[in-house]
Image: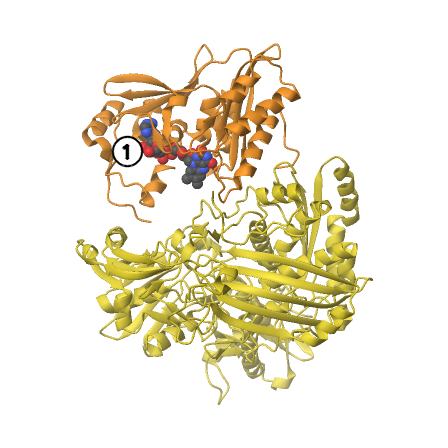
Chain colours: A yellow, B orange
Amino acid sequence: MSQALDEVKIGGLGASRQRVEDARFIRGRGNYVDDIVLPGMLHMEILRSPLAHARIKSIDTSKAWAIPGVRLVLTGEMAAQRNLAWMPTLSYDTQAVLATDKVRFQGQEVACVVADDPYIARDGVEAIVVEYEPLPPIVNPVQALAPDAPLIRDDKEGQTDNVCYRWEVGDAEATERAFAEADVVSKLKLHYPRSHPSPIECCGSVADYNSATGKLTVYMTTQAPHIIRAAVALVAELPEHMIRIISPDIGGGFGNKVPVYPGYVCSILCSILTGRPVKWIEDKTGNLVSTGFGRDMYLTGEMALRADGKILAVRFHADTDQGAFFSDAQPSKFKVGLLHSAFACYDVPHGHITAQGTYTNKAPGGVAYRCSFRVTEAMFFQERMVQAAADDLGMDQAEFRRINLREDDSFPARTPFGFLVDSGQYAKCLQMGLDAIGYEDFKREQAEARKRGRYLGIGISTMTEPLGAGNSREYDILGIKMFDSAELRVHPTGKAILRTGAKTQGQGHETTWAQIVSHELGIPADDIVVEEGDTDHAPFGMGTYASRSTPVAGAAVSMVSRKIRAKARKLAAHLLEVSEEDVEWELGRFYVRGAQSRGVTIQECAMAAYTNMPDGMEPGLENNAYYDPPNLTWPFACYIATVEIDPETGVWDVLRLVAVDDCGVRINPMVVEGQITGGLTEAYAMSNMQFQTYDAEGNIVGGNYMDYLLPTAWETPGFELHEVVTPCPHHPIGAKGVGECAAVGGPAAFVNAVMNAIGHTGVRNIDMPLLPDRVWDAIRTGKDISGAPPFRNA
Amino acid sequence: MYPSRFRYEAPRSLGEAFALLAEHGDEAKVLAGGQSLIPLVKLRFAAPAMLVDINGIPELAYHREDADGSLRIGALCRHADLERSPLLPGNHPTMAAAAPLVADPIVRTRGTLVGSLCHADPQGDWASVMLALNGEIIAQGPNGRRTIPAVDFVVGPFQNALHPGEIAVEARVPAARGTVSGSYLKLERRVGDFATAGVAVAIESVGGQVIRAGIGLTGVGAGNIKAVEAEQSLVGYTLDPDVIARAAELAAGAARPKTDHRGSAEYKRHVVATFVRRALSGYRAPVAA
Ligand SMILES: Cc1cc2nc3c(=O)[nH]c(=O)nc-3n(C[C@H](O)[C@H](O)[C@H](O)COP(=O)(O)OP(=O)(O)OC[C@H]3O[C@@H](n4cnc5c(N)ncnc54)[C@H](O)[C@@H]3O)c2cc1C
């Protein structure tokens, strides 16, 4: 009789195990960068530019130096002497560390002050006098491309305009032919506004350069410590083995903590210059005005349609506003990330995309805010276009999707832009969502309410998105391939430590990785400790973002566990005195084929690895695995929102939101639900209230948390979650990424619902956020509402 | 965020507080709930050399109704005290409606009504309520007390009529006559946000006829606005749709909104009219909150 362990009981796959990290987080016992205190530590504060575009005429630091307790005032000129006034970005551009020639956005780092405490450092910052000669600011691509536009990047040799890249993909000619045959061509134009990842913990670092040993230790808020180590080695020309990056507990990342920021570099330089540890903790405004934002993309597209609803082709153009430096934190070979994953869930025969990026006098960034590199813009535009197309055809939006979604037996399939989608049950997910929301009933209710002057609306968003970069053929950072890694050490008593090259920032790796090991080895999850983030300890990995941890590092965890099991099998054979071929595995134990009661547990094998190994066998039970995924993973999601608008004020409330997520096998259902709930909350915030833009002078609007709103439990609607499981065909445990699906696919559901509610007005689009005054204006005027900068205060 | 250096004193009595204020003059600031002052100090928008924390003066922590029905609110009465007060729902509907709409639950546990009036933020909610209710502020200094009507208390954005060395010890809402009705309606983007537009309405009527009307507007001008013409248009009338529509129009006309990230000027003016109409009609929003 089987003596296999009950997988859910030991905290394996499918167990909604309580998050082990929460015990310390909710008791205030976490260890964040700001909790690090080193002997002799100094504090650094940054002086930021008040202007968006200006030449620096002079910087007078004498008053700051004169303040007692000020130890160092660092300017761009001093950084330049160390060749550190500029640094490379992850998109093969350069970015100013401290401005030397010009400031190029409001909030740009100009100087920093290091002092005995942060109060004195702030006093020092206020005492610096900078003389600026203002230059005309540019806040959108149209201004950037005007013939008489000032050249923002005059620092770059050969740069004669404000274009930072051009890119295209797809088959223009075939697409053109399809459009020639179309019965209906549906068009849409919109702006996906800037949004900010807004981690609760802002960025920060404690740099500690030991001049005696030559070793640099940096505690920092990074989602990718090994990449930082490689970057520091390359930029600061320090030997890589003398650099240790430690990413302790991280209070949220959302893509914001992937790039290298000037503050990190300055703290390192200041530690080298002062010979003492230097702490830099960014304030909220500093984070909002200077660190990586998401989106800011202008999209214009059209869809070729047959009268029966079949999509024949799509084509669109994207203008991305990159800010002052092209520092998109993305590792693909493609200039606009994975924008061309648009329409992957639909059977679209032909497509063509063009894109162009421009420099503007705005904060740089273009980070993948809870998304796989521009996938959010792709899926939002896709779903907005799908709704517009259904409306143009006079067809029900659900029916239009049914006609065009890929069928279950069509996988694997190549999209017109080159991706290989490999699995899914799209129609089933859609139907589950429609049933849950009561689609037909709602439509009847909506029609009834309309007669009484009430505005109800329903919006659908269906999408599959590519999660889990790499494969190594198409994805790298600074040439380093996008694999990931895990190292597992099983101790003599069968307890274990697992380390990976990923870095949790709230995702719950300490909980879920242990569950994968549990699934593979039958060691209870509580017996496994997970450690990440210290480059002197963890195997080399590419970090956590773009929902890649489970697809890549999670796969490595599986693979390393299997290596351990393979060795344990040899130990079991030795202990059971049979040949290896006669040993069978069930969860937690090996047994002799044909005599199931004769067996040894994984713990007994672990003890034997240290005390009783067979002749010739290397002692110990540890291993590592590097995993290069064969493909991205393709989760599918269907989100359906219903809303009611108060037509007199334009205020809209969410009545219900139904989510159906298929992210393959769920390791910890509770953690997955947490990810979806969080993502939907952010989606709601982006669609409803989050507003960050620039006025004509280049002043940031929404540069503090009084103006840039994070939703609270008060107004965030409740979400109804459902699941479908289509295992990933290439992932060792069948899991797909999920961290971003809801933030990526969610916004279109809310916006489509509002647009549906005012369908009778003829308005095709209101740019996000759908602030009440915009909705009111649209209803009143019957016109589309653009949210593109410059913002006109009056 | 690191404020510049300041001194801090926590007097135990009003007398001690006056002495400290007299000694430090312009350099000193009273610290009540700190929900406006501390953010300013953290951002270095204000750099007082001395903070006189009045939270340790127990005699300021009260609110009560006098025998004649007037309401007295001490300087340490928190927004949350008013939100939970049994005194408000019956006789003070405008106050009762406003209390849970000020800021968010966390801020309400510290912030004070009197502090909000002293702060004189044009976006502040309580000032509109006080304007609608013809409230008064009691100022006390080393030389005694004086009463300042709410309409005269705010002299400009973030500027009040207190003399140096004075503390606002109490706000007073006069007793109403006849049947009382009223409300406070606030359009906010999210809980804890300042008003895109807010409207305080207070009506006293006898036999259905309005004998006194108060209308205060939030967030639609350089200060809170008392919509005097709109108020007067109601007196002597019953609240039928034409009368209400005229008052709504007059109130919107009194608004001086600006376009900002909360909404366009035109929109805010429209919201004022809509909210005045709704408040006067006893309207309840159809959309579930
Ligand atoms: C996140 C947030 C959201 C908010 N949202 C809103 C909102 O929606 N609506 C709203 O109306 N307010 C809002 N506020 C402000 C809040 O209501 C404050 O509590 C109020 O404005 C000030 O009261 P306080 O007791 O905190 O005063 P403090 O911050 O202590 O003081 C404010 C000013 O008044 C002076 N002062 C205070 N008390 C006295 C006194 N008794 N005598 C003389 N001078 C005095 C101080 O010197 C200072 O200049 C918000 C605040 C925060 C932090």
Give the x, y percent position of residue A310: 78, 65
Instruction: Give x and y (percent) for residue A48.
Output: 34, 56
Label 1 crowd (10 A; few <14 / some 14-19 / many >=20): many
Indicate whether A222 appears above or below B120: below
Residue A256, x across and y down, in percent: 46, 61
Whether the residue carrying mark 1 lies under 8 Å from ligand 1 is answered with: yes
- Whether residue B235 is situated above or below residue A62 in the rendered picture: above
Quadrant field for ligand 1: top left
The residue closer to the viewer here, A240 or A708, is A708
Extreme residue toward the front, this view: A148
Viewer-proximal residue, A338 or A251? A338
Residue pointed to by mark 1: B29
In the figure, residue B4 lies in which quadrant? top left
Work out whether residue A308 or residue A430 is closer to the camera in this orientation and state it: A308
Amino acid type of the residue tagged 1 in the rendering:
Lys
Tell which subunit mark 1 falls on.
B
Left or right of residue A375, residue B86 in this image: left
